[in-house]
């Protein structure tokens, strides 16, 4: 099976469902997120249906989330009150496999009882989820401390590395890798964790340097990079101060702060998904097609504003509903696949059939989850009866065991962003049976492909065939990029205006709340940034999807991307430098990895390679070439679209030439399948 299909991935495909208030009428447009055009004339219903989640439900949810945060932060406070205790717990979590909350549940000071401080904030089963969230934070902090201590050892033993860290605009990649190498149990994000540790140390060092250089009236504050320049009169003093400070931290410890949990998220990761005590309950609505009722248990002292006899939590419930859009999307994909088959578009039909099968599989898993809830509750009720029906109990147990064995979905996450409440349900990627049913069994995955991040195209993909020929595609979303650039120009103007108004106000009215005109400008700036982030998501989704299916149709097994984590733009590149260094490239790679894992590729089959000289080297002869304006020019043009090799006397598109080099010339820089 090596060349056909890999083992199914364990990656979760998270699907989003917008939660609505119970009485709100949901239309069938889009994913069911738009309000109905006609609402019943009841005044109460109109008042409650103005938003997806009305004010009363949102207030109850906000109180519940606040209690959950308090419980998590109380756990963190107890753990980090003794650093040696936190260190021992972190080491135990590092060695543990599976649910992390099991490590913390053994600790006596973290146990839940009805009358202790934890019992005031959360119920018993929710305490498991709080322990799981806290355990992840403790383990992350333990890893961060190890990385910071490793970095301090490097900086104390080598002053040159310390000066590089403070002088360079970007943190040196070789220093990041040295810090990362201390972690044995590496993950996809270990590089970024090491980068975060380096940034944390550099940030605190910069603050310490500023304290020793008080700003005089009328002077501009010098940056640390300026203080460390060769011609700076403060260079020697600053270098000695940095060395002394790092040595002090090595001896006495780095000034870490106690981590806190501030996110508007309740994660049911430690739930078992088959009992009422877990804190959430799904039930299909028999009157409304494809709609699901959600009952969320509120913490102690918080009661819902509506009573529901069907709720397993009685009055300690906030009840919501969501539209299950999975069957509708599956039917739509099937219809389009049939149309594509009739038109002879086989590849497009295969893509749509896979999408339909994946949505049907997820919908079936959601229905199985609801059946599991119903059967477990029926079993509990039947076992509580004075006269038990042993035959019915045995049938329920058999059905529950079958549903458990076939379950491929994880407990959900409830997330609040501003006034929107979202339900995130993680589903396992399609299994091998589904992949074989929706893909051609004759397609062999043996080829490799290189991907270049072009200046004029989002991605340029080159696939190498067996006969030394290539198949290429240039993927770009020019309209979205132009819109994104216009919005970014607005942010530049607004940031300048906000900074000017802020500085003027703070200079005249220090330590006072800014006026409404400043706050409105800041809100406008944040609104524009939200639009930019939305366009970034849309670009990354579209580009990643087109890249993945192009590779699938050409039987690509291994995909090579250029590693731009340490990219530094040259002078004169203007916005091209920002476009290449932006995290949008990382989002595209992550989107490709996510989709390829869903198609059965282990770790996405992705490698990151060093892109050095791939744009200046001819892929045919290996000689150095120049960028030219078009296919008829031979004189070098800075930023030219084409590449000319004088030795071969050939012209290639510059990005295509780089993509071919990426898969053939360079060696991988990280573990196979890892994108970080």
Image (cartoon, rainbow, N blue to C red):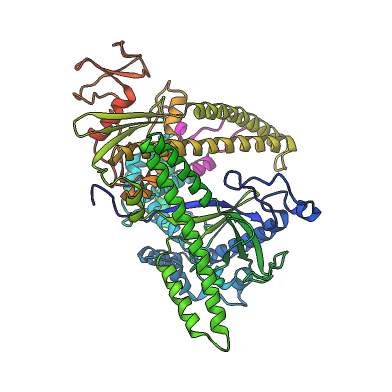
Considering depth in this image, is 59 or 569 the residue closer to the camera?
A: 59
Considering depth in this image, is 486 or 233 the residue closer to the camera?
A: 486
Q: In this view, does 158 lie to the left or right of 121?
A: left
Q: Is residue 392 left or right of residue 57?
A: left
Q: Which residue is drawn at 61% across and 77% down?
A: 114
**Looking at the image, is 138 positioned above or below residue 157?**
below
Considering depth in this image, is 657 or 479 the residue closer to the camera?
A: 479
Residue 663, by quadrant, is top left
Task: Give residue 560's position: percent from left, percent from top.
Answer: 30, 38
Task: Give residue 127's position: percent from left, percent from top.
Answer: 54, 69
User: Is residue 589 in sight in this rendering?
Assistant: no
Q: Which residue is drawn at 61% across and 73% down?
A: 119
**Looking at the image, is 13 positioned above or below residue 229?**
below
Q: In which quarter of the image is the C terminus?
A: top left
Please state the extent of the stretch shown in magenta in the rendering.
205-231
**Looking at the image, is 540 positioned above or below residue 258?**
above
Task: Give residue 671's position: percent from left, percent from top.
Answer: 28, 47
Residue 149, by quadrant, is bottom left
Badge count: 0
Magenta segment includes 622 = no
Q: Residue at x 61, y 64 (%)?
A: 296
User: Is residue 25 in sight in this rendering?
Assistant: yes
Task: Give residue 223's position: percent from left, percent from top.
Answer: 50, 34
Q: Is residue 315 left or right of residue 401?
A: right
Considering depth in this image, is 574 or 296 the residue closer to the camera?
A: 296
Extreme-right residue of the structure: 43
Magenta segment includes 225 = yes
Q: Is residue 75 left or right of residue 521?
A: left
């Amino acid at each position: 099976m090596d060349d056909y299909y890999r083992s199914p991935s364990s990656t979760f495909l998270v699907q989003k469902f917008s939660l609505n208030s119970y009485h709100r009428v949901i239309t069938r447009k889009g994913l069911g997120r738009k309000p109905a055009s006609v609402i019943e004339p009841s005044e109460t219903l109109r008042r409650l249906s103005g938003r997806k989640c009305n004010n009363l439900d949102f207030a109850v949810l906000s109180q519940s989330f606040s209690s959950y945060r308090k419980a998590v932060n109380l756990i963190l406070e107890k753990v980090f009150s003794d650093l040696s205790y936190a260190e021992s717990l972190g080491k135990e979590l590092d060695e543990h496999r599976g649910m992390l909350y099991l490590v913390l549940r053994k600790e006596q000071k973290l146990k839940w009882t009805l009358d202790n401080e934890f019992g005031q904030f959360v119920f018993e089963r929710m305490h498991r989820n709080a322990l799981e969230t806290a355990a992840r934070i403790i383990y992350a902090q333990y890893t961060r401390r190890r990385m910071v201590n490793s970095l301090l050892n490097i900086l104390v033993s080598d002053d040159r590395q310390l000066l590089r860290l403070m002088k360079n605009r970007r943190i040196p990649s070789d220093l990041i890798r040295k810090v990362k190498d201390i972690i044995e149990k590496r993950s996809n994000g270990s590089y970024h964790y090491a980068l975060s540790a380096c940034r944390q140390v550099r940030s605190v060092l910069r603050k310490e340097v500023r304290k020793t250089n008080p700003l005089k009236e009328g002077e501009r504050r010098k940056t640390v990079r300026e203080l460390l320049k060769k011609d700076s009169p403060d260079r020697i003093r600053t270098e000695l101060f940095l060395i002394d400070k790092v040595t002090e931290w090595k001896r006495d410890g780095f000034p870490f702060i106690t981590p806190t949990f501030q996110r508007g998220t309740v994660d049911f990761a430690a739930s078992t998904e088959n009992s009422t005590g877990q804190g959430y309950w799904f039930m299909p609505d028999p009157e409304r097609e494809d709609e699901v009722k959600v009952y969320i248990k509120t913490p102690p002292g918080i009661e819902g504003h509506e009573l529901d006899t069907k709720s397993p939590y009685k009055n300690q419930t906030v009840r919501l509903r969501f539209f299950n859009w999975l069957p509708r999307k599956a039917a739509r994909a099937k219809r389009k696949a049939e149309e594509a088959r009739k038109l002879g578009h086989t590849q497009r039909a295969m893509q749509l059939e896979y999408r339909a099968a994946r949505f049907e599989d997820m919908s079936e898993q959601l229905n199985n989850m609801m059946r599991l809830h119903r059967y477990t509750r029926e079993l509990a009720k039947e076992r509580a009866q004075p006269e038990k029906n042993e035959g019915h109990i045995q049938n329920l147990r058999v059905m529950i065991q079958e549903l458990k064995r076939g379950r491929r979905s994880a407990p959900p996450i409830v997330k609040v962003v501003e006034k929107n409440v979202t339900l995130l349900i993680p589903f396992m990627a399609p299994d091998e049976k589904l992949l074989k049913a929706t893909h051609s069994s004759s397609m062999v995955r043996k080829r490799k492909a290189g991907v270049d991040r072009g200046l004029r195209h989002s991605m340029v993909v080159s696939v190498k065939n067996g006969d030394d020929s290539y198949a290429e595609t240039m993927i770009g979303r020019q309209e979205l990029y132009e819109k994104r650039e216009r919005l970014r120009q607005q942010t530049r103007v607004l940031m300048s205006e906000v900074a000017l108004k802020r500085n003027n106000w703070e200079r005249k009215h220090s330590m006072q709340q800014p006026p409404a005109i400043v706050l409105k400008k800041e809100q406008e700036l944040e609104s524009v940034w939200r639009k930019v982030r939305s366009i970034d998501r849309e670009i990354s989704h579209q580009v990643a999807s087109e890249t993945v299916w192009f590779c699938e149709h050409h039987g690509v097994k291994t995909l090579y991307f250029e590693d731009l984590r340490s990219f530094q733009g040259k002078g004169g590149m203007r916005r091209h430098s920002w476009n290449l260094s932006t995290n949008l490239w990382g989002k595209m790679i992550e989107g490709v990895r996510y989709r390829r894992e869903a198609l059965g590729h282990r770790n996405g089959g992705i490698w990151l390679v060093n892109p050095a000289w791939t744009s200046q080297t001819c892929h045919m002869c290996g000689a150095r070439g120049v960028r030219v304006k078009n296919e008829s020019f031979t004189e070098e043009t800075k930023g030219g679209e084409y590449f000319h090799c004088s030795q071969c006397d050939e012209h290639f598109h510059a990005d295509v030439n780089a993509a071919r080099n990426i898969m053939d010339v360079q060696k991988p820089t990280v573990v196979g399948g890892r994108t970080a």
